Image: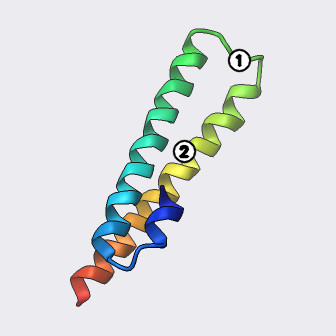
Amino acid sequence: NSGEGCGRHLDADDLRFLDTANGSARELAYQLSLAERLGFFADGDQRSVIDLADETNRVLSALVRAVRDKRADR
């Protein structure tokens, strides 16, 4: 979604696709958290996967803020 949004020429389209990607990343983070609570991970594996999902959420959130700030400056 983020790649498709970047290919659009309108910031509104870019934001829409980034918001969708952000929602998908948050959904994944929830599913990973649930899988951890249900014991589906081998010992130690869950932390690195959950940390990567958290980092992805932070990066996507920063991208959304940057595009919104750029849009507000116009």
Q: Residue at x 39, y 44 (%)?
A: 23
Using a 10 Å C-alpha cutoff, classify the residue at mark 1 as few (fewer than 14 neighbours), some (14 to 19) or many (20 or more): some
In front of the other: 47 or 18: 18
The amino acid sitting under disc 2 is: Asp
Residues under numbered marks 2 and 1 in contact, where contact means CB atoms less than 8 Å apart: no
Q: In this rendering, is residue 34 above or below 55?
A: above
Side of 46 where 27 appears, left or right: left
Quadrant showing the C terminus: bottom left
Q: Identify the secondary structure beneath mark 1.
A: loop
Q: In this rendering, is residue 40 above or below 63?
A: above
Q: Identify the secondary structure beneath mark 2.
A: helix
Q: Which mark is residue 41?
A: 1
In front of the other: 7 or 18: 7
Using a 10 Å C-alpha cutoff, classify the residue at mark 2 as few (fewer than 14 neighbours), some (14 to 19) or many (20 or more): some
Location of residue 35 by image quarter = top right
**Number of numbered discs on residues:** 2
Side of 22 where 28 appears, left or right: right
Residue topped by disc 2 = 54
In front of the other: 43 or 22: 22
Q: Residue at x 46, y 28 (%)?
A: 30
Q: Residue at x 42, y 50 (%)?
A: 22
Q: In this rendering, is residue 39 above or below 55?
A: above
Q: How is the image coloured?
A: rainbow
Q: Residue at x 38, y 79 (%)?
A: 9
The amino acid sitting under disc 1 is: Phe
Q: In this rendering, is residue 20 above or below 15?
A: above
